[in-house]
Image: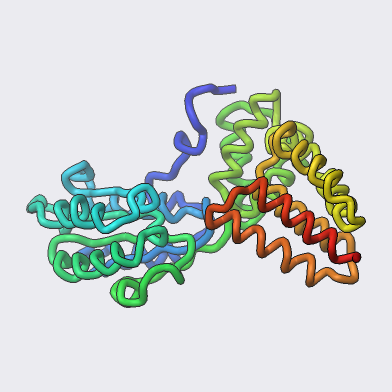
Amino acid sequence: MSVTGMWVEKYRPTQLSEIVNQAEIIGSLKALIKDPTDMPHLLFSGSAGVGKTTTALCLSRQILGSNYNLNSILELNASDERGIGMVREKVKKFSKWSGFADIPFKIIILDEADEMTSDAQTALRRIIEDASKICRFILIANNVSKIIQPIQSRCAAFKFTSVSEEDVISRLEEIAKKEKVKVDKKGLEAIYEYTEGDLRHAINLMQAAASLGGITEENVKTSAGLTKTSDVDEVLKIALSGKVTKAREKMIELIKVYGMSESDFLKYLNSAVFKSKHDKLSDILQIIAKYDYRILVGANSEIQLSAMLAELAKLEN
């Protein structure tokens, strides 16, 4: 097996034609860049790992050609620098620099733009207007609803879809062949089931499983921390029986001893609810959703999960 770095970067597409699964979007973008001067600002949205950033980089390479360098393209992750300072100091400064005579415009890629503050987005809106003669913006967002409407209206929007199981498995098989890794069908299916159309995550998980000797269902589950997922069903049963302390102990064991992430615990708990066919299914789902949101916005995950189990315990009383 090759050990030359991260597979997700080693096999990242460099041309639009290599992008997996987004045929309609790629077709539209190829038509746009036949005459790049007519290309509008772009807004790519969709879930993680479906090719948004890779598409932006491929598009930029094809437009800028040999001038694809630090002076012609600016790539920023807006979740790292969310505020108005980033917009004023980096984006505005770059948008004022003169470009090259043989490129149609410079390109600014703002990844995770939906994490920018509203003030930063308002400032960005003005820069987009002022710099349109010499710059094109490519905004990338998981949640397009968090992008203010004035910015959305200034961009051509493209919604990326989750990568299909067939396409994910085909891509994984291609990489495994190049890396001379043994694979079996159940192992690849387990990767897809766990990553749910996130191709980036799927490639990372396959590399982790390969380090254990091959892409088997058992190795995938071990790499993903899935060997204890059936215990999440047990946590739900214990909590609903009113035994909060015991349920919490089991939950802490899964997270701290077996390495299951809090988000995965909630995902498997959600699945366990549907399998249980409980009479109060809707109430349970609302409780899980409430605490998932609290953790997402920054509350202490252990405290919130403990409180969730306590609230589940009350349903039967």
287 versus 295 height, above or below: below
x and y, in percent, of residue 67 in the image: 18, 45
234 versus 228 height, above or below: below
Task: Say which of 92 and 289 sits in front.
Answer: 289
Describe residue 147's horizontal placement relative to residue 176 as left or right: left
13 versus 134 height, above or below: above
**Residue at left offset 27%, top offset 69%:** 122
Q: Quadrant of residue 118?
A: bottom left
**Residue at left offset 21%, top offset 55%:** 91
x and y, in percent, of residue 117 in the image: 35, 62
x and y, in percent, of residue 210 in the image: 65, 28
x and y, in percent, of residue 120 in the image: 29, 62
Q: Quadrant of residue 186?
A: top right
Task: Say which of 90 and 161 sits in front.
Answer: 90
Residue 58 can be seen, yes or no: no
Check the picture and name the quadrant holding the N terminus: top right
Task: Say which of 9 and 145 sits in front.
Answer: 145
Describe residue 284's horizontal placement relative to residue 111 as left or right: right
**Residue at left offset 79%, top offset 56%:** 310
Describe residue 199's horizontal placement relative to residue 69 as left or right: right
Q: What colour scheme governs how the chains and residues are painted in the rendered image of this protein?
A: rainbow
Task: Say which of 314 and 79 sits in front.
Answer: 314
Check the picture and name the quadrant holding the C terminus: bottom right
Describe residue 288's horizontal placement relative to residue 48 as left or right: right
**Residue at left offset 18%, top offset 60%:** 135
